[in-house]
Amino acid sequence: MNSMYTRVSVVGLGYIGLPTAVVLASQGVEVVGVDVNENAVSMINGGKAHIVEPDLDARVKAVVSSGKLRATSTPEKAQAFILAVPTPFKDGGVPDLSYIESAARSIAPQLEKGNLVILESTSPVGTTEKLAGWLSDARPDLSFPGLSDNIPDVNICYCPERVLPGYVLKELVENDRIIGGLTADCSVRAGALYKIFVKGQLLMSDSRTAEMAKLTENAYRDVNIAFANELSIICDKIDVNVWELIRLANRHPRVNILQPGPGVGGHCIAVDPWFIVHSAPEEAKLIACARAVNDGKPAAVVEKVKKAAEKLKNPVIACLGLAYKADIDDLRESPAVGIVELLVKDGTGELMVVEPHVKDLPERLSGLPGVKHSGMESAIKKADIVLLLVDHSVFRKIPYDSLRDKVVIDTRGIFN
Ligand code: SAJ
């Protein structure tokens, strides 16, 4: 390794922080991972990942055994600090920056002249400037970019992650990266750090543009999924097969419509557009509308199931899939879970829920009456209605014959 960074601290060892710590450590950097979750810290030090992501477990084991990655709940000195903590939103769509602020305050006592602090958490525009303010508050003995005329003692940069769950370790290395320094010098120093493990291009910008770029990427996807979801609702009304429609329209050389689904899940696309809406509520009309369309899709699916169920006596409904998207075990913010919950509340038949990627039903569903975690074949066999909620590969292999006498409600278009 030939870099100015030989010791880096990653603060927040979640879906982004832990894989980032692992890829840095794999390149020979000494990485100190910091997390407030003691259970995560002890699992990582035992050579195990506390989250599920392909290959992550084996990679954590390798870098912990080689001594390059160590986790702790108390920040230590390092040449660079990467903050990768959550930024949820509070009621009313207000972004909650308290995790960033407390991460900043926790590393402040360890900062030394020449250090670099990078924020990776998805953040509303202006957060990196606030971060400089919090650090400066805690360390009046050091100078920070934008806050004094001195050459900064500590450089600060915003570098959003853009990796796709399921492909995190690959995309962390291969994707291009936006580097948004508070000054041009901050960007150069952060670029030198990412160069250690990123094979994609490093795109130099400023912090506000980089913050907005992250939000824009996810809002762009949300708006495009909303277009597909709205089309699916229109097509149901006018009796057109939306899947065939999209297939055909996409043969136009400049049309590329995404796929409708049961709604938008996960912890990014359904959240990040609100940060834009919150910062410009009057102006962000299309972005807010897309959120409403996507958030309304689960209720539209429930209505469709209820209509089908009304025609049957005590129907058995096989609900296929709970994850927020295909071939993962992540149920967070999953529209499928919400749909099953709504069906239970409405007393719409007996529900046999199939989710081969998890051992148990989530707490939200496990205690509810009339819901059973079931095997795929027995659920399909017993079902009057088959409700496909996730396009897992195993569901794609369901023989058409086994569905012949059922009402099929396919929210992902895999049987079309
Ligand atoms: N979905 C559809 N139709 C589609 C595509 C997706 O209904 O055609 C649904 C999925 O089923 C899922 C949701 O949208 O419920 C989101 O899935 P996703 O695969 O689009 O994205 P995420 O949330 O897993 O990851 C996104 C990615 N952002 C973009 O593609 C712009 C990823 O690159 C980001 O790093 C990640 O958000 C993040 O952390 O922000």
Image: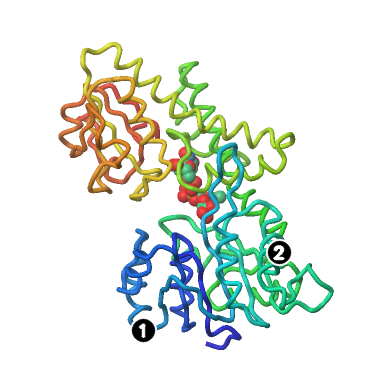
Q: Is mark 1 within 8 Å of ligand 1?
A: no
Q: Which residue is mark 1?
A: 66
Task: Please provide percent x and percent y for residue 209.
Answer: 72, 57
> Where, by quadrant of the figure, is residue 19 drawn?
bottom left
Question: In percent of the image, x 35 and y 41: which residue is there?
Answer: 391
Q: Residue at x 34, y 64 (%)?
A: 39
Q: What quarter of the picture does the C terminus occupy?
A: top left
Give the secondary structure at mark 1: loop
Report the side of 113 relative to 60 (left or right).
Answer: right
Q: CA distance from mark 1 to mark 2?
A: 37 Å
Mark number displayed over residue 133:
2
In the rendered structure, which amino acid carries the disc numbered 1? Ser
Q: Nearer the viewer, mark 1 or mark 2?
A: 2
* Residue 317 locus on image (x, y percent): 25, 26
Q: Horizontal and vertical percent for residue 146?
A: 78, 67
Q: Quadrant of residue 55?
A: bottom left
x%, y% of residue 410?
A: 36, 30
Against 254, residue 186 (above or below) is below
Q: Which amino acid lies under the numbered mark 2 shown in the image of this protein? A: Gly
Nearer the observer, 3 or 170: 3
Image mark count: 2
Question: Hey, which residue is sitting farthest right in the picture?
Answer: 149
Q: Is residue 325 above or below residue 415?
A: below
